[in-house]
Structures are given as C-alpha cells and as structure tokens.
Image (cartoon, rainbow, N blue to C red):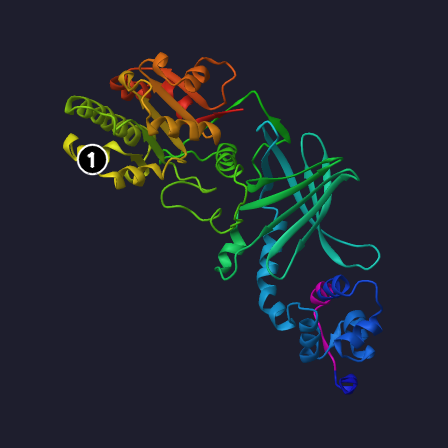
Amino acid sequence: MNSEDSISKNKIDPAYVRLLKSKINQTFAGITQKQIADILGFGPTTFHNLINNNKGVIRTVNEIARGCEFYTYDEFLDKKPILNLIKKRLLEDDGIWVSYCFDRRRRLYESLWRFKETQRPQTNESFIEVTRDSSEFQYKGELTLDLDLSLTVSTLYNSSHKIEYKTAFPTKKNESFYREFQFLNLEAFVSRRKLFFSTLEVLIKLPNTSNITPKKIQYAIIKAQMGLDGIPNNYTYLAFNFLTRNVSKSRRLIDNFSINEKKENGSYLNYKHDIFISCPVGYIENKVEFDAIKDSVSQIIKVLEDKYGFKKKNIHCEIIKYKDFESVQRDDRHLFFESRKYIDSTHYLALVPKNLGRHSSGMYMEIYFRILRKLPAIIFMEDRHFLPSLLHGLSESPDRPINITFKDYEISKVANYINADVTTEYLFQFSL
C-alpha cells in the first residue's frame, strides 16, 4: 500500500489526528510507529505523514481508524459541528457555571467552575482548562470531549486529591440543544488519600448577576422561591431536590437531554411538582369513615391547586380514585397500585387517623419508604401513641431524619393547616 505515498495528500484536521493518535497509543502501547504501521498493513511513510504531519488520503485514514476500532474521519466530520457547539457553550461568558453535590452527611456543596481554552507550551495544541473552586480546595484540570459525545473532566488539588467527572451528551438532537443546554448531570469519581467513592454532581449555568461564592450549605434552610405559576424556580432548591431524588440509586442513567428539557408541568432538573397523599383505604370499616376521609382529602387537593400551583393530574391519592365506599368493598386493587407508583413524588403527605392504630397498613410501608430514601415527608397524626413502635420512636426523637416532619393534627383540619402561610416551610423547603 506504499503506492499511496505518491498520491497527493489531503490535510487532515489536527483535532482528529490527536484523537486517533491517542487511541493508537492506547491500543498499541510500547511499540514503535513502524511496528504499528506493519500491524495495520500500511507503509511507515504513510503512517508517519498522518501522525506527525496531519496529512493523508481520507480512504487510507479511515482504514487506519478501523484497524484500531476508532471513529473514521468521515464520522468525525459529521460530529465536528456538534462538538464545536458544545465547546462554544461551555466557553461562553454569558453566565457562570455552578455545581451542587452532597457530602457524606448530605449537606450541600456549592462550587464555582470556569472553562478556558488555552494552549500547551510544548506543542501549541489547544485544550479546555477547567478550574473548580469549592469551599475547601481549588481543583484544576482538563476537559476532553470525545467523538461519542462523552465528556470527561480530570481535576486534582494535589497528588492525593483527585476528581474525575464523566457524562454524555445525547445524539441526534436539534442544534439548539447543544447551543443552549443549561445543565450537566455529572458522575464524579473521587480519590482522597485512601478514600474512593463516586457520587452525582449537577452543573448549572447561572446568569452573571448571580452572587455565588463557593460554600458548604449546612444548618440552613433552603426555601423555595415561587414563579408566577406557583412552581419553585430557585436553582439551589431545584438542585437539592434533584440530588435527593437521584443520588441514592445504585445505578444512574446519565441523560443530559431530559435534565435540560423544559417540562410542560414543572421546571428544570426534572422537577415535576407532584404530590402523593397517603391515607388508609382498605381498612375503612363503614361509609361514614370513608366519606369523612375522602372529604378531607378533597379539601386538601383544593388548597394544593389554589394556593400551591399543583395540577390535578399531579396530585396522587388512592381514595379519590374510588367513587364511594361500596366500590372499595369490591376491592378494585388496580387503583391502589396505580396510586402507589407515585410514592417517590417531590412532595408527600400522610394522613394517619387515630383508629388506624397498629393495623398492618400499607400506608406505614409508604412512610418507611420515604424515610429510608431520605425523601421529604410531612405526616399528620391524630394520635401518635397509636403509631407502630418504630414510627412512634422517630416522631419523638430529636435526631430523626431531616425533612421528615410529624404533626399532631386532626385529619379534618389538615386542609386549613396547609392553607395557612406558615405551612409553606414544611411543604416547600429543605433543611440541611
């Protein structure tokens, strides 16, 4: 194939050659260029011209790429406009990048990020330099954007403090997505001396007017700032809510389209603004009890719609699915499971009547679920002494999980309670 050496060479994009060279070095570590050329079936001159002079016949370059299972030059040219849009968005000075993540005690770190295009002194090769300022350390590193639209950021504070971030952009989206994305869902791999762990960190582009300094938010309350639609829209609140609902999963699907998608009902960061109202149904013994609880739930729903901006389709409760007490007796259990699938909603109310007592009610399992997942919950009890022992102990303990609130209140009066202005702090804020 040395005959190609005499063919007029095309100039190959240096960015592609750098990526291909990195792949070749990984695939054929420790051997010379001549040996690599022989393995791939090309003359050393052809190989040298490509790797060192950025010159080559495109057909030959594609064959070399396939030989080391890498993207062809044609595929690179197809992806290049998207890569350029992503880089441009990261480097734009129309705002500041701020990240949020949890520490081991689920307190919130707020850190500043800066992206800067610079050149290596030895080769004049350009790359994106990354600086991450946290309340404790300043990490510096480099951003790499691969042809599969995966993004890697390697940073370090010193030799024993390193963080590597990975994420991926969706393929085949409109150009406007890559030009305007506002959020990145990052998987962080942390190395601190003998401590190694992974966690979720969310990166948000905020306006230049934002007054942000790196800090650790603890012993504080994150209050929701409502938009005209009654939906929380301040990013510290949204980030905390997003992390709370996603960070406990053992495996997470990184989806940078969904996190940027504008929801019809809700805001960014997958915030849906929905509520699950848990109340006993199966144990109810007569029509009077059924009508009383359903009436109370109906009043609560009206307050949630009128005062808090909830939509009817985002309020989930089993009892409102039943027309009357007789329909419960027919045991329409599909309604029960239809409601319970919303148990991880952004907000949660539990209504525990006194005569439920220590019955083996699925409602208690729903409360346990919220507590174990560290999801916010407000639990209204007509008499806490009749709670199961574990819940009773939690309700009395000053060390109970944060964002779990127990309130002694008659179910018939809950609607009036949540209609009072003071209640907003229980429904729409997080404690740290």
The correct choice, above or below, for 87 with respect to 56 in the image is above
Q: Which residue is mark 1?
A: 322
Magenta stretch: includes residue 10? yes
Task: Spot the residue most to the front.
Answer: 360
> Is residue 313 or residue 215 the one in the foreground?
313
Judged left or right of residue 4, residue 353 is left
Q: Which residues are magenta?
A: 9-19
> Is residue 272 or residue 230 the one in the foreground?
272
Instruction: Determine the image quadrant of residue 321.
Output: top left
Mark 1: which secondary structure? loop
The correct choice, above or below, for 216 with respect to 399 in the image is below
Image spot of residue 93 (x, y percent): 61, 46
Q: Residue at x 65, y 71 (%)?
A: 73
Q: Quadrant of the N terminus?
A: bottom right
Judged left or right of residue 305, residue 28 is right
Image spot of residue 241 (x, y percent): 48, 34
Judged left or right of residue 329, residue 391 is right
**Which residue type does callout 1 highlight?**
Tyr
> Is residue 332 or residue 210 the one in the foreground?
332
Q: Quadrant of the C terminus?
A: top right
Image spot of residue 195 (x, y percent): 71, 35
The correct choice, above or below, for 356 with respect to 184 in the image is above
Magenta stretch: includes residue 40? no
Q: Residue at x 51, y 60 (%)?
A: 175
Judged left or right of residue 254, residue 111 is right
Instruction: Determine the image quadrant of residue 422.
Output: top left
- Label 1 crowd bin: few (<14), some (14–19), many (20+), radius 10 Å: some
The correct choice, above or below, for 198 with respect to 7 in the image is above
Image spot of residue 401 (x, y percent): 50, 22
> Is residue 228 or residue 342 the one in the foreground?
342
